[in-house]
């Protein structure tokens, strides 16, 4: 390893700052390889008493990571902070911490150092265009389903061996030196993920993905009057997605009228396929458009669906949503004040 001396700057030779929207673990692997060392050895030198890879290291900006990294390279704290999922606090959710609920964050299914679930998405075209392939933070989010730049569906596993992405394990098997492979190589079968063919998606879904990203990045206001923060919209969007895939018999009529439910694998939104999530997100965003009129129109066909079911398991009780539901869908259709004006 070149130039590694903790305590003086600059330390890392061949240093490169994180690329746009790069995830911390991706940047850490590239940094280690650029040093000519395996990421496991690199982490062992930097954090001899920590075991990073048996947890979701991208979730939270640990103080020990901050202290060591900022001492060893010229990266500023804000840029480092922005490589973690916790930097989505205030946009994706009010607070994205380590212990908080996992909504919108794709589970990795960590088993020792292995990831068994498909929690790391990728766009093969983006990986192909990267001078040095790297993984994006947005590819860890359940609200991601396609790449708006390339117009293809994101992939969640190696198309050759069907195993999830474990890019930090590609070095397994090489004794001391880092692998000759790039991060875009499947750790298991060594196929090049960047050579995979992504399925193209239609303009409607591309526009939807772009809208969701713009809301998340705060370049677009959520489509609800009088709300300021993205999470005030995204919390309810997630709740609507959950209603659409819930196993509650009270909701099947609504679900059947809006979706092809046979594709839904589980009632946990984050554990459904990219295709199902895209379909559910499209339906849920349509229900929240022109709020509350589109929603009330749909509900007119389901007069028995009352507020208790629509609010069941609601985690964040945002007033813009709960007030309309309570006022118009309480008990049954006879209490629906909004509907006569809509019909
Ligand atoms: Zn792309
Ligand atoms: Zn593979």
Image (spheres, helix red, strand yellow):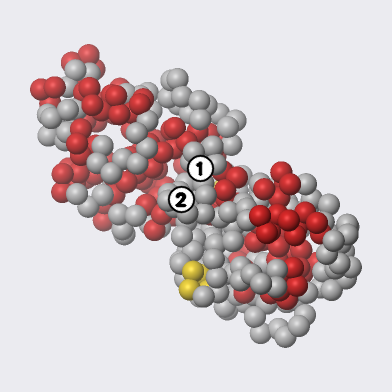
Identify the image quadrant of the N terminus: bottom right
Residue drawn 52% across and 49% down?
A: 97
Is residue 338 rendered to the left or right of residue 27? left
> Element at badge 2?
loop
Residue 114, percent from left and from top: 53, 74
Is residue 8 rendered to the left or right of residue 251? right
Gap between marks 2 and 1 measured at Cα: 8 Å
Dot 1 alpha-carbon crowd within 10 angstroms: few under 14, some 14 to 19, many 20 or more? some
Residue receiving disc 2: 100
Q: Quadrant of residue 241?
A: top left
Mark 1 within 8 Å of ligand 1, using the beta carbon? no
- Marker disc for residue 95: 1
Residue 152, percent from left and from top: 54, 51
Residue 65, percent from left and from top: 68, 58
Question: Do tag 2 and tag 1 residues touch (Cβ < 8 Å)?
Answer: yes
Residue 77 appears in the rendering? yes
Identify the image quadrant of the C terminus: top left
Front position in the image: 298 or 110: 110
Front position in the image: 328 or 190: 328
Is residue 339 rendered to the left or right of residue 294? left
Front position in the image: 65 or 17: 65
Residue 256, percent from left and from top: 21, 45
Residue drawn 65% across and 51% down?
A: 83
Residue 39 appears in the rendering? no
Is residue 317 rendered to the left or right of residue 155? left
Dot 2 alpha-carbon crowd within 10 angstroms: few under 14, some 14 to 19, many 20 or more? few
> Element at badge 1?
loop
Question: Counting residues from the N terminus, which is met first, the one under dot 2 or under dot 1?
Answer: 1
Task: Give the residue at the far top of this rendering.
Answer: 341
Residue drawn 43% across and 20% down?
A: 225
Mark 2 within 8 Å of ligand 1, using the beta carbon? no
């Amino acid at each position: 390893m070149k130039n590694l001396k903790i305590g003086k700057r600059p330390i890392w030779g061949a240093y490169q700052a994180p690329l746009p929207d790069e995830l911390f673990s991706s940047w850490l692997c590239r940094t280690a390889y650029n040093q000519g060392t395996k990421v496991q050895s690199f982490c062992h030198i930097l954090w001899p008493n920590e075991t990073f890879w048996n947890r979701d290291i991208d979730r939270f900006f640990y103080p020990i990571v901050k202290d060591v990294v900022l001492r060893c390279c010229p990266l500023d704290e804000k840029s480092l902070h922005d490589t973690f999922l916790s930097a989505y606090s205030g946009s994706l959710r009010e607070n994205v911490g380590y212990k908080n609920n996992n909504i919108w964050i794709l589970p990795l299914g960590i088993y020792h150092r292995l990831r068994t679930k498909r929690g790391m998405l990728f766009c093969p075209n983006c990986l192909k265009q990267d001078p040095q392939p790297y993984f994006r933070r947005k590819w860890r989010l359940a609200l991601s389903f396609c790449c708006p730049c390339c117009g293809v569906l994101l992939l969640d596993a190696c198309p050759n061996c069907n195993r999830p992405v474990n890019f930090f394990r590609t070095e397994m098997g090489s004794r001391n030196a880092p692998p000759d492979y790039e991060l875009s190589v499947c750790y298991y079968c060594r196929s090049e993920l960047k050579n995979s063919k992504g399925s193209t998606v239609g303009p409607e879904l591309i526009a939807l993905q772009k809208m969701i990203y713009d809301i998340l990045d705060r370049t677009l206001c959520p489509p609800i009057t009088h709300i300021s923060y993205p999470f005030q919209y995204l919390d309810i969007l997630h709740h609507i997605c959950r209603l659409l895939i819930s196993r509650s018999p009270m909701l099947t009529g609504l679900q059947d009228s809006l979706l092809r439910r046979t594709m839904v694998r589980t009632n946990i939104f984050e554990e459904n396929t990219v295709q199902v999530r895209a379909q559910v997100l499209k339906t849920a965003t349509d229900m929240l458009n022109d709020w509350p009129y589109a929603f009330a129109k749909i509900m007119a066909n389901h007069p028995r669906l009352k507020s208790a079911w629509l609010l069941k398991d609601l985690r964040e009780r945002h007033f813009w949503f709960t007030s309309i539901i309570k006022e118009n869908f309480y008990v049954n259709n006879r209490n629906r004040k909004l509907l006569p004006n809509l019909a």
